[in-house]
Image: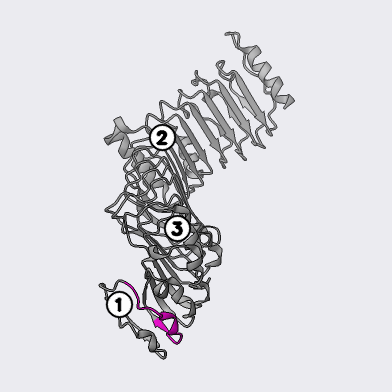
Amino acid sequence: MLPSRMHDLVNLRHLDIEGASCLKEMPKGFSKLKNLNFLNHYIVGKHEENGIRELGTLDSLQGSLCIAKLENINNSSEALEAKMGNKKHINILTFKWLPGSDIVDFQTSRDIFNKLQPHGDLNELSIVGYRGETFPDWLSLGCFSYGNMTKLSLSRCTNCRQLPSLGQLSSLKHLEISELDQETPFKSLESLTFESLPSWREWLFSDEFDAFPQLKKLSIRECSVLTGDLPNHLLALEQLSIVECEQLACSLPRVPRLHQLDVKSVYHIRMEEPLHWVVIEGTQLVNSILEWLADNQSTHLQCLVIRNLTISNCPEIDSFPEGGLPPSLTTLWIKNCQKLARYITSNGLQCQGLACLILYSWDDVKSFPREGCLPASHWSLYLGEFLTLETLDCGGLQHLTSLKELTIEYCLKLENITQEKLPSSITELHIKDSPLRRTEPSKDPGGNMNFFFDIAESMTDC
């Protein structure tokens, strides 16, 4: 217990009570210490004379301040009298509620916290044990006011259903979610997005506890200096998007339900779980993912269930791994990967279960496809933006006996069809923005000549 008449020390400028763990409340009349410059802890009492309103006159405080036992505040009017917005020289602030069994009024908790809004030049903010379901407006809607905040720490916010709008914290370097030793935190949160955090360097998270048990969608975008791993146990996660995080090198967490992965401009990522949908975009990451696909094909074939794979804007990839593509793959989209395009043109594409093949933005290809280049299984083929393509080689399509749909778009130099005919299995042909003209086919004793002519006539009408 501090001296009961401490309020008589009106010229007191510095009070350090660090380590005074037995201190249960502050003495009465603290508001009289108007010359106080440094106070590292204030413990809210249950009485009016030592409650939160006693901080209202202490506008000269500077440096670091921790306000504890906020559960002793009865209403938002008391919190407003603390005048936290006037304490312009506080740069590190901690709000702390102690755990307890009291029945919590979520709205009252939020209203009280709303009135404790600090000034906008705060550098670091820690929130421990907050009891509300949602954060106050100044943190959820008005985050843009805290452009100097470099660190945000959230601990034991067990009732919260959503996180603050972290994307508006333009200077945030450190996000810490820790001390999850009471109940499962963020137990109802289903979607979490981090976006446009150019200074965020590390996501600190306790590995001992399972947070976000209902999180289904996680998106991390434009966090250019973020490094390190993601939380370990995201058991409900279904969709993960990591875009423009050039320094991020991490392992995917344990994500047994993950079926869609979208990555672009990421340095390196390691995966242990099977997926249904993978989108790869960028240059650094593609090899590690394709190697993972190959490893899974050879060592975890029974659990590999990837269905959709997109490889986009990866100019340095020049082949598929030795293990090839997974046999469960049904849809493959390859866009703007010129070295890979040359590899497929020369060596062919081996993927026996493929149903839909989309090839987009290929350069330096004048005739396509070469005979045996494409897998025979697929029933839908799309060729788009082959800017140098001049000839569609039907000889490379004859073995595609299951092909039903053929779409050709934005092939601005495509003018010729060679060899005898398109596959007779085709039921839909779409041609757009391609100056294709009919060339005289060879005689077709099998009776498919009309098919070719019909298609050719419709081509010239496009």
Residue identifier under label 3 = 109
Q: Where is residue 6 in the image (x, y as percent from the top left)?
A: 35, 85
In the image, 101 versus 138, the foreground residue is 101
Q: Which of the two discs, 2 and 1, labels the residue nearer the N terminus?
A: 1
- Is 273 situated left or right of 452 in this image? left
Q: Which of marks 2 and 1 is in front?
A: 1
Relative depth, front residue between 456 and 417: 456
Crowding near the residue tagged with mark 2, few <14, some 14–19, many ≥20 C-alpha atoms within 10 Å: some
Give the quarter of the figure containing the N terminus: bottom left
Residue beneath disc 1: 18
Q: Give the distance between the C-alpha atoms of the residues marked 2 and 3, in whole angstroms.
A: 42 Å
Give the farthest residue toward the bottom. Answer: 11
**Disc 2 marks which amino acid?**
His
The mark nearer the N terminus, 1 or 3, is 1
Q: Mark 2 — residue? A: 276
The magenta span reads: 25-38
Instruction: For the residues labelled 1 and 3, say whether their Cβ atoms are less than 8 Å apart.
Output: no
Q: Is mark 1 on a helix, strand or loop?
A: loop
Asked if 375 appears above or below 273 in the picture, the reply is above
Instruction: Quadrant for the C terminus, please.
Output: top right
Disc 3, SS: helix
